[in-house]
Image (cartoon, coloured by chain):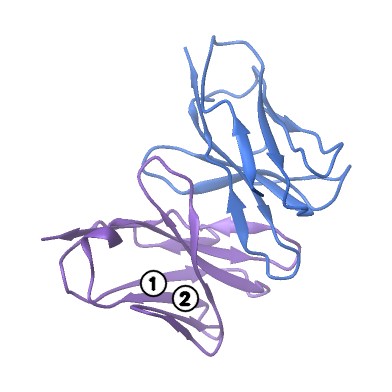
Chain colours: A purple, B blue
Amino acid sequence: RKEVEQDPGPFNVPEGATVAFNCTYSNSASQSFFWYRQDCRKEPKLLMSVYSSGNEDGRFTAQLNRASQYISLLIRDSKLSDSATYLCVVNRNNNDMRFGAGTRLTVKP
Amino acid sequence: DGGITQSPKYLFRKEGQNVTLSCEQNLNHDAMYWYRQDPGQGLRLIYYSQIVNDFQKGDIAEGYSVSREKKESFPLTVTSAQKNPTAFYLCASSIPGSLEAFFGQGTRLTVV
């Protein structure tokens, strides 16, 4: 079993739709959590950190459920520019970061 | 400007040759990482280093070697022992405390 698992998708949604991604992790000692965005043939870039209390950044909302060991990302009012692969990242307390395989999103006109 | 620089962007090598990928950062980050990404797949950890002169194997270290002689530099050598070296290689460094990672632009290695 992979340490960080994501549904690979692809998710194909129309503009304006709301879409949600989930990610599960197996190491209960994991300390910090992130969502990264990766455009085709580019490096990943930080989208947002994920906090236990949940956090929101504009159209994006991230949630963490430590008891069930999953992380979620909700995108509201999808834009064409949201099309990318979204990577779930889990960091142990020793700077050992593990990435999920990513969920591919395509937003269509 | 601060950042992480990987070079070269594209690299071609003949099978059986060792090749070294460069990664330099001027962000004063302690931790640095090397990942490999294959088409349609996520990132897999090759090696990481938390401080100078120290590094640990990741999930797929076989056929690779690293060094961390300076804080700014974390070169990766892809040896002839790596059976399938053609891939996109990404170097990253992270901020102490927040653990947010910053990535270089990557090196596409093709072995022919």
Q: Nearer the viewer, residue A67 or A22?
A: A22
- Report whether residue B109 is seen: yes
Q: Position of residue B8 (x, y in %)?
A: 57, 25
User: What residue appears at the point 27 percent right and 59 percent down from the top-left corner?
Assistant: A81
User: What residue appears at the point 70 percent right and 38 percent down from the top-left corner?
Assistant: B24
Please name the residue that numbered disc 2 is placed on: A71
Judged from the image, the secondary structure of the residue bearing numbered disc 1 is strand
Q: Position of residue A22 (x, y in %)?
A: 39, 72
User: What residue appears at the point 50 percent right and 81 percent down from the top-left corner?
Assistant: A64
Q: Hey, what amino acid is under mark 1? A: Asn
Judged from the image, the secondary structure of the residue bearing numbered disc 2 is strand
Cβ atoms at labels 1 and 2 below 8 Å apart: yes
Q: Position of residue B59 (x, y in %)?
A: 63, 46
Mark 2 belongs to chain:
A
Please name the residue that numbered disc 1 is placed on: A22
Relative to residue A68, is residue A37 depicted above or below? Answer: above
Relative to residue B86, is residue A81 depicted above or below? Answer: below
Q: Is residue A76 left or right of residue B33?
A: left
- Mark 1 → mark 2, Cα distance in angstroms: 6 Å
The residue sitting at the front extreme is: B1
Q: Position of residue B17 (x, y in %)?
A: 63, 11
Q: Is residue A74 left or right of residue B96?
A: left
